[in-house]
Image (cartoon, grey):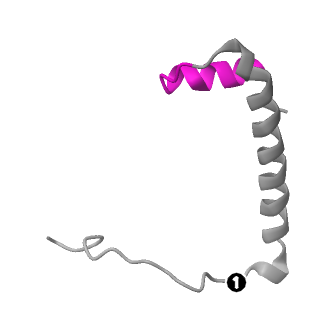
Amino acid sequence: MVSEAVIRELATLAELPLGDDRLAALADLYGTWLTAANALNARLERAEHHDLMPITTFTHAHVGSDE
């Protein structure tokens, strides 16, 4: 679970003005998102997904070049 203190600290670090009245709602929201993200990550780490690749990949011409 994400605490209100964590949300307050993140808002401070990002220099976002965040009222105390929004801390609980954001803590619940981020807690839900993190739980779902961790579940998806665990699912995609299974062996049957190791060979999956994105349909579209993007390359950057400047990466690795001498330009």
6 in the magenta segment: yes
Instruction: Give me the residue at 77% from left, 47% from top.
Output: 33
Question: Does 32 sit left or right of 16 as displayed?
Answer: right
Q: How many marks?
A: 1
Residue 2 seen = no
Instruction: Give me the residue at 16% from left, 72% from top.
Output: 66
> Residue 63: x percent and y percent?
30, 70
The quadrant of the image that shows the C terminus is: bottom left
The quadrant of the image that shows the N terminus is: top right
Instruction: Give me the residue at 47% from left, 22% from top.
Output: 15
> Residue 51: x percent and y percent?
71, 85
Task: In the rendered view, tell whether residue 25 sits above or below residue 12.
Answer: below
16 in the magenta segment: yes
Camera-nearest residue between 27 and 43: 27
Q: Which corner quadrant of the image does residue 39 belong to? A: bottom right
> Residue 42: x percent and y percent?
83, 62
Helix, strand or loop at label 1? It is loop
Task: In the rendered view, tell whether residue 47 sits above or below residue 42.
Answer: below
Instruction: Give me the residue at 60% from left, 26% from top.
Output: 10
Point out the residue furthest to the left here: 67
> Residue 36: x percent and y percent?
83, 53
User: Which class describes the residues within 10 Å of circle 1: few (<14), some (14-19), or many (20+)?
Assistant: few
Q: Amino acid at mark 1?
A: Leu
Q: Which residue is mark 1?
A: 52
Look at the magenta stretch and give its main secondary structure.
Answer: helix
Residue 66 seen = yes
Q: Which corner quadrant of the image does residue 4 belong to? A: top right
Question: Does 35 sit left or right of 65 as displayed?
Answer: right
Where are the magenta residues, as a range?
4-17
